[in-house]
Image (tube, helix red, strand yellow):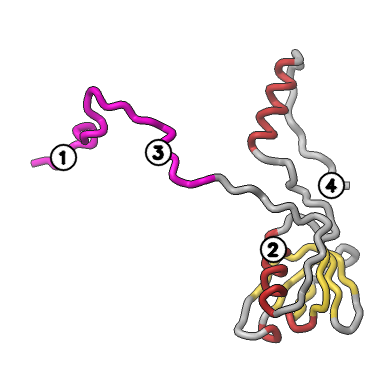
């Protein structure tokens, strides 16, 4: 005994054509440009949202603590708790190999100061560069990553 076959579905029988455009169900998303942004941290919600964006950012940020220290580095982790004092970010400082853990409650300011290392690095951009090189007649080429400096 066997069940219905996939090929016997009405959408797969003769005379019915699949429209690939109608199959697309997820709209595209435009990437937000954060490089150079200095968010206003007037409320707890604004601070939480800005630190979540800092976690997703692929460049360095500068955190200014309430005691006046400035820490520039890459936010690699965060933990969100019920209060600002129980929430924290972890950061790799640019000038040190130590990892720092900073409570949200200790942060006075945030700035997206580093270059977004993945800006413009979409699949479409890669393919466009590939075809430009191929059309120019280059041989044995590969697309190499850009220097971070």
Q: Do the residues under discs 4 and 2 have CB atoms within 8 angstroms? A: no
The image shows residue 89 at horizontal and vertical percentages of 72, 73
Residue 148, label in figure:
4
Badge nearest the viewer, 2 or 1? 2
Name the residue at 41% across, 32% down: 20
Q: Quote the CA–CA distance across marks 2 and 1.
A: 48 Å
Between circles 3 and 4, the one closer to the viewer is 3
State the mark number for residue 54: none
Q: Which mark is residue 4?
A: 1
Report how far apart the C-alphas of labels 3 and 4 lie in the structure.
39 Å
Residue most toward the top?
Answer: 137
- Image coordinates of residue 76 in percent, x first then y, are 72, 65
Q: Mark 2 — residue?
A: 53
Coordinates of residue 60 in the picture (x, y in percent)? 81, 60
Mark 4 surroundings within 10 Å by alpha-carbon count, few (fewer than 14), some (14 through 19), many (20 or more): few
In what quadrant of the picture does the N terminus appear? Answer: top left
- The answer to which image quadrant residue 8 occupies is top left
Q: CA distance from mark 4 to mark 2?
A: 21 Å
Which region is colored magenta? 1-27
Q: Which is more toward the observer, 142 or 68?
A: 68
Is 84 situated above or below 64?
A: below
- Determine the secondary structure under disc 2: helix
Q: Which residue is mark 3?
A: 23
Labelled pair 3, 2 in contact (Cβ < 8 Å)? no
Residue 87 covered by magenta stretch: no
**Residue beneath the point at 80% across and 78% down:** 107
């Amino acid at each position: 005994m066997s069940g219905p076959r996939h090929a016997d579905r009405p959408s797969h029988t003769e005379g019915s054509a699949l429209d690939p455009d109608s199959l697309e169900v997820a709209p595209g998303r435009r990437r937000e440009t954060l490089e150079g942004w200095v968010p206003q941290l007037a409320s707890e919600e604004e601070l939480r949202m800005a630190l979540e964006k800092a976690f997703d950012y692929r460049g360095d940020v500068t955190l200014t603590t309430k005691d006046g220290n400035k820490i520039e580095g890459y936010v690699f982790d965060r933990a969100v708790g019920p209060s600002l004092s129980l929430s924290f970010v972890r950061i790799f400082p640019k000038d040190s190999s130590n990892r720092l853990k900073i409570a949200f409650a200790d942060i006075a300011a945030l700035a997206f100061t580093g270059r977004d290392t993945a800006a413009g690095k979409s699949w479409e951009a890669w393919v466009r560069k590939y075809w430009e090189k191929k059309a120019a007649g280059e041989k044995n080429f590969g697309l190499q990553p850009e220097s971070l400096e």
